[in-house]
Amino acid sequence: MPDYLEATMDKFIFKVARDRYYTSEGVWAKPEGTRVRVGLSDFLQQRSGDVAFAEVKPAGTSLGFGDEIAVIETIKVNVSLASPVGGVVARANPAMSTAPEAVNQDPYGAGWLADIEATDWQADRLRLLDAEAYFRLMRGQAEEEAKKP
């Protein structure tokens, strides 16, 4: 169970898992051996709405850093998600085809999107934000959204 940074905005609580790296858009990457597990941050999933459909690139797909790894559809929006790491999709989360709501229910656990066999994790990691940096960015974005009418 990861340790979290938490921010409360209005009636919402946003969690950022400390054991991952993040894109500025809110996609997380967690190294696990030679693979990197990828998913949506709590803030991104709350901001996007209830996930009704998730299409993840299948195993064997080659990706560069920033290439589309998945598309999620919610009542509010369709979101194209950029990969936080280059490599080959080793495994897509099978739950995404039958229970995409796992993204909302457990974004740092059962709601992961894919495992990627990273080509150069050390180089890609340098392009990402650590949990504290993402937390500051996310908090600023949440504060800006709270100001909107």
Image: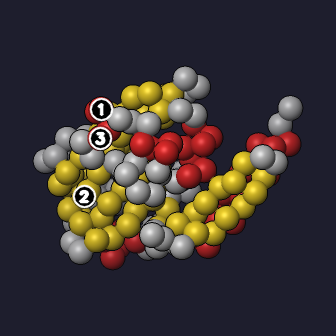
The label nearer to you, 2 versus 1, is 1
Disc 3 from disc 1: Cα separation: 5 Å
* Pointer 2 with pointer 1, Cβ within 8 A: no
Q: Residues within 10 Å of mark 2 (few under 14, many from 20)?
A: many
Is disc 3 placed on a helix, strand or loop?
helix
Three-letter amino acid code at the position of disc 1: Thr
Left or right of 124 on screen, residue 60: left
Q: Which residue is mark 3?
A: 95
Q: Quadrant of the N terminus?
A: bottom left
Q: Identify the mark nearer the N-term, 2 or 1.
A: 1
Label for residue 116? Answer: 2
Residue at left offset 69%, top offset 54%:
13
Q: Which residue is mark 1?
A: 98
Residue 100 position by quadrant? top left
Is disc 2 placed on a helix, strand or loop?
strand
Q: Quadrant of the C terminus?
A: top right
Disc 2 from disc 1: Cα separation: 21 Å
Residue 52: percent from the left, percent from the top?
44, 27
Q: Is residue 133 visible?
A: no
Residue 148: percent from the left, percent from the top?
83, 37
